[in-house]
Image (tube, helix red, strand yellow):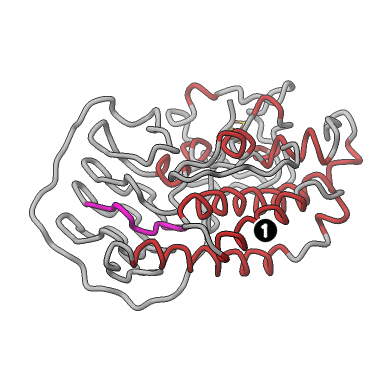
Amino acid sequence: MSGETARVEGGAAPAPLAAAALRADCARCFGLCCVVPAFAASADFAIDKPAGRACPHLRDDFRCGIHATLRDRGFPGCTVFDCFGAGQQVSQVTFGGRNWRAEPRLAPQMFAVFPVMRDLHELLWYLTEAIALHPPGPRADELRAVQNQTARLTQATPDALLALDVAGHRRYVNDLLRQTSELVRSGLGGGAEYRGADLIGADLRGADLRGASLRGAYLIGADLRGVDLRGADLTGADLRGADLRGADLTGAIFLVQAQLDAARGDASTRLPPALSRPVHWPASASGGPGPARPPAPSRSRSGSRGGRGRPGRRRR
Ligand code: SF4
């Protein structure tokens, strides 16, 4: 990222500059997502790997040696991680193109900076969307000021980045995002409250989720076929294995690519314009909604941030 902040002129999609800077460019990254986190052998990863040790499939050129067959080889988690461009920012800007293999003494600091930068880039993604959603006024100005401030933080030195109170900054930004969400959803007449709800495996076909708050909701394996999710707030919702075939996500708020990548869908799933149809989804429509069975609303308030510890990484 150049440090220049995005100019946003409306519409749900981030401005082109922001979209480019906040998308992973693995060719300019030193494989940080394949080294920094620990993996536990599971359905997402075929192996155990301690934090700070390179995955055995990471090649000398920092590309994944099994990229084309990740799912077949037991690494689906690698296909659903999004660093929001933090990898190339740390590699090319914070550390000026110096890498941990050629200069091992850089490794501890570089590896510690990566998750900090990822948090900042993720916040920038959400702020960019919030600015696009918000009508002009003092709150929109505040969002732009925070976006500028956050973008400046991404330019800081490694020591300064490691000294940041990222959790405090995230709380502040989350509050602004929540207010934006409430404003947008109130324009739709409001919606059901499922914030932090446990909807794992729930059959939500036919549920009225337009404009609903699903912030931090656990939708793992949920059946959302044919559901109208327009204007629904999906911040940090865990969509792993959720069935989105025939669902309408146009206008969904704070939905990110990694959430889609972790879900199931097909050609009949309608997406926000800023997001892409995952390559592993069938190219044709393959299923439809069944009978309605709406869930009971939950009053749980846990979970309001994106990512929420979801494993995974994507290297090309
Ligand atoms: S994408 Fe996954 S399998 Fe490939 S090198 Fe990275 S961590 Fe290893």
Q: Which residue in the rendered view is the most extreme toward the left?
A: 291
Q: Give coordinates of residue 290: x percent, y percent.
A: 10, 49
Residue 232 rendering spot, x and y as whole percentages: 34, 58
Q: Quadrant of the C terminus?
A: top right
Left or right, residue 163 beside residue 199: right
Residue 101: quadrant of the picture:
top right
**Residue 296 vertical position relative to residue 289 in the rendered view, above or below:** below
The reply, left or right, for residue 81 in relation to residue 12 is: right
Instruction: Identify the residue at image location x=59%, y=36%.
Output: 23
Q: Where is residue 198 shown, x and y percent of the image?
A: 34, 67
- List the single residue furthest toward the bottom: 299
Ligand 1 sits in which quadrant?
Answer: top right
Number of numbered labels in the structure image:
1
Q: Which is nearer the eye, 36 or 136? A: 136
Segment colored magenta: 228-237
The kind of residue on which mark 1 rests is Ala
Reply yes or no: does residue 232 show up in magenta.
yes
Residue located beneath label 1 in the image: 145
At label 1, counting other C-alpha atoms closer than 10 Å, the crowd grade (few under 14, some 14-19, many 20 or more) is: few
The question of residue 61 being in magenta is answered with no
Q: Is residue 183 above or below residue 48?
A: below
Provide the secondary structure element on which disc 1 rests. Answer: helix
Q: Is residue 199 above or below residue 89?
A: below
